[in-house]
Image (cartoon, rainbow, N blue to C red):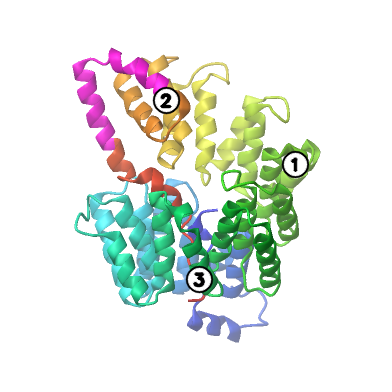
Amino acid sequence: MNALAQHPLRGVGLALAVSLAAGCAGLPDQRLADEAMARGDLATAQANYQALATLGYTDAQIGLADLQAANGDSAAQARAEKLYRDAAETSPRARARLGKWLAAKPGASEAEHREAEQLLTRAFAEGEDSALVPLVVLYLQYPQTWPDVNPQQRIDQWRAQGLPQADLAQIILYRTQGTYNQHLGEVEQVCQRWLTRMDVCWMELATVYQIQGNADKQKAHLDRLRAAHKTGHVPPERVESVAQVLADANLGKPDPQAAQALLTELAPEFPAAWVDLAKLQYDYPELGDVKQMLDYLKKGQDAAQPRAELLLGRLYYDGKWMPQDPQKAEQHLLKAAPSEPQAHYFLGQIYRRGYLGKVYPQKAADHLLIAARAGSASADMALAQLWSQGRGVQVDRAAAYVFGTLAQRQQVPAAADLMSQLEPQLQPAERSQAQQLLKREEQARGANWQATVSLMQNEQEAQNL
């Protein structure tokens, strides 16, 4: 789920208003909406946010906008932006949300990026500390727009003021620079200090211990996490993120059994965990059979989890767990696509490879571009192959060069071979065109788009600051 939809907002005035109505059946309830959002019950959250937003409650407008922003549909996202703008007239938190939204908006203009910077700066000055991290990410992603801004100097100044969010911004900077592993001790020290004020630190500490292979510290950390979650001090999505760290093979030796145990405890109250359990089993087949995986996914579908549709589509797409069925794969992936960018990659491949009986080049290009701009290196490679191979579409070496270059930058293994074949074939006019197209695509994504896109999409805000 998009990070915007994972962090419900609570307003003192609104909470007081709805508390006065407690016991009156049928009245919309902000607390109920917030709690429904936290456990992934989007239908209940939307019904309550919608009713309260209609009455003019700012926090409900923001909550409803969060739901709309999590939807990949362009019309829903346009509604989200309008809701944020309406609420931003009076709310610093809404200004921070709108700034973050404009910073992450696909295809946003430089004017929108500058507006985002102004909104985030103002919200931060008004005491909305959650604006600090997206502000730093904006500077990192578009350095050409703010050539005089040194993110590290800004972070140093904010850290000198003792701001917890500044420490989080420093950790994100380490991730972006690829130096996170060189600062594990500092990350541990920072997150031990702010653990009770920034719930993202539960995930960061789990990451540190996983990279270090420190089983004793990790076990103690998980025990403390369970206790904190049981008393309501840690939200379920943070427990989920810790389980994902445990299962990540890129962070030292994975512990899928520990991840499975954590998610199994979480799933009855947090439906997204059913899908996590299915994905965990997909990655680690020794954890169960296909019947169990499908049972997890059915529970995810019943709870209206788009990721359940994504994984079902993938199961029918690759044919590893059950017979390949492109038609069923397409059906499930189309359901997931509005909110799950990865679904666009698999749809693009279905259309590019002719799995439905023939090649649909325009559909393939449209879906793969959405996935690529959402951070999929494989989608860039698939686009390069689409334009270079000419299956159902006229060969376009300039376009192939653009996406092949982007895939190569992300170290896709096959990209180097493709580029070595393309380079000698490019005519001077094609090369010039390719350079212009590449520059345009880079601008659309931001200078450091691959390093920061996931950070912007999943920016982890501190709670209860």
User: Which of the two discs, 2 and 1, labels the residue nearer the N terminus?
Assistant: 1
Q: Is residue 453 left or right of residue 282?
A: left
Label 3 SS: loop
Q: Quadrant of residue 445?
A: top left
Which kind of residue does numbered mark 3 sit on?
Leu
Residue at image mark 3: 9
Q: Is residue 44 visible?
A: no
Instruction: State left or right for residue 341 relative to residue 29.
Output: left
When the figure is inspected, residue 277 is found, relative to residue 63, above or below; the finding is: above
Start and end of the magenta stretch? 415-440
Please, what is the three-letter code of the amino acid marked with disc 2? Answer: Ala
Contact (CB < 8 A) between labels 1 and 3?
no
Residue 439 forms part of the magenta stretch: yes
Q: Nearer the viewer, residue 263 or 412?
A: 412
Numbered label attached to residue 415:
2
Residue 64 placement (x, y as % from top left): 49, 63
As drawn, is 240 to the left or to the right of 100? right
* Residue found 71% across the figure and 60% down from its top: 266
Q: Is residue 181 above or below residue 335?
A: below
Answer left or right for 267 relative to 151.
right
User: What residue is pinned by disc 1?
Assistant: 293
Q: Residue at x 61, y 34 (%)?
A: 331
Q: Could you say which is closer to the camera, residue 194 or residue 69?
A: 194
